[in-house]
Amino acid sequence: MRQTAHQDATTPLRPSIDFTAVRAALTLAEVLALLHFVPNRIRGAEQRGPCPVHGTRSAARSQCFSANVAQNIWHCFKCGKGGNALDLWMAATGQNIYDAAVDLCQRLGRPLPTKSGKPRPHMLSQQTAEQRREPVASGEEVATT
C-alpha cells in the first residue's frame, strides 16, 4: 500500500536541497580537516592513512584509506567504502544525506543550496513550530516567521 506524506501544522517545512550544488561547494580537504584526519603518507594530491569511517586499529601505520584531494574522491581498501566529500561525512558521522548536507554547511559557515535557487538560512528550517511561536500580550500564541 502506498503511503502519502502527511505534513501537519507542527512539522517544520524542510527545504529541498540541491545536493549537486552542495557537493560542488565542499572539498574533501575540508571534510578531512573536520574529521581530524592525519595522513601517514602524502604523495602529490593523494593522502593515505587510517580510515575515519571504520576506525583502523593500527592508526600509526595503516594506509588502507586513500584520499585524492585534487579530485575530491576517497576510498577505503578495507571496508570498501568510497565517494566524494559529502559521502565521507555521511559515512563517518552516520547521518543521512539530508542531515549531513545541513550539518556540513553549518560547520563550514556556508548557506544551504536549495532547489529554488536561493540559499536559505538552514537554522530556521530546523526550528520547530513551538520555537517559532511567541506569546502576545493577550496570552494567545501567534506563529511568527
Image (cartoon, helix red, strand yellow):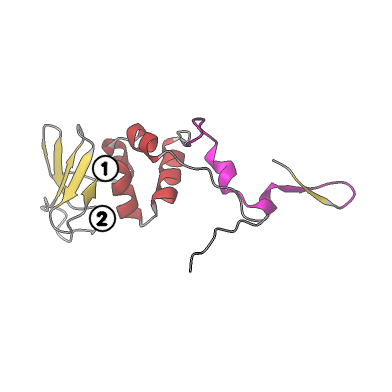
**Does residue 105 appear to the left or right of 145 in the view shown?**
left
Which residue is outermost to the right?
Answer: 138
Label 1 secondary element: loop
In percent of width and height, residue 138 lies at 90, 49
The vertical placement of 66 against 57, above or below, is above
In percent of width and height, residue 122 lies at 53, 41
**Does residue 11 appear to the left or right of 96 in the view shown?**
right
* Magenta stretch bounds: 115-139
| Front in this rendered view, residue 143 or 116 | 116
Which quadrant of the view contains residue 43? top left
In percent of width and height, residue 110 lies at 45, 33
Which residue is painted at 48% across and 69% down in the image? Answer: 1
**Does residue 4 appear to the left or right of 71 in the view shown?**
right
- What label sits on residue 84 in the rendered view? 1
Residue at label 2? 53
Label 2 secondary element: loop
Assess whether residue 112 is covered by the magenta stretch. Answer: no
Q: Residues within 10 Å of mark 1 (few under 14, many from 20)?
A: many
Say which quadrant the C terminus sits in: top right
The vertical placement of 138 against 114, above or below, is below
The kind of residue tagged 2 is Val
| Front in this rendered view, residue 100 or 9 | 9
Which residue is outermost to the front?
Answer: 1
In terms of sequence position, does the residue under pointer 2 or pointer 1 come before the other?
A: 2
The kind of residue tagged 1 is Asn
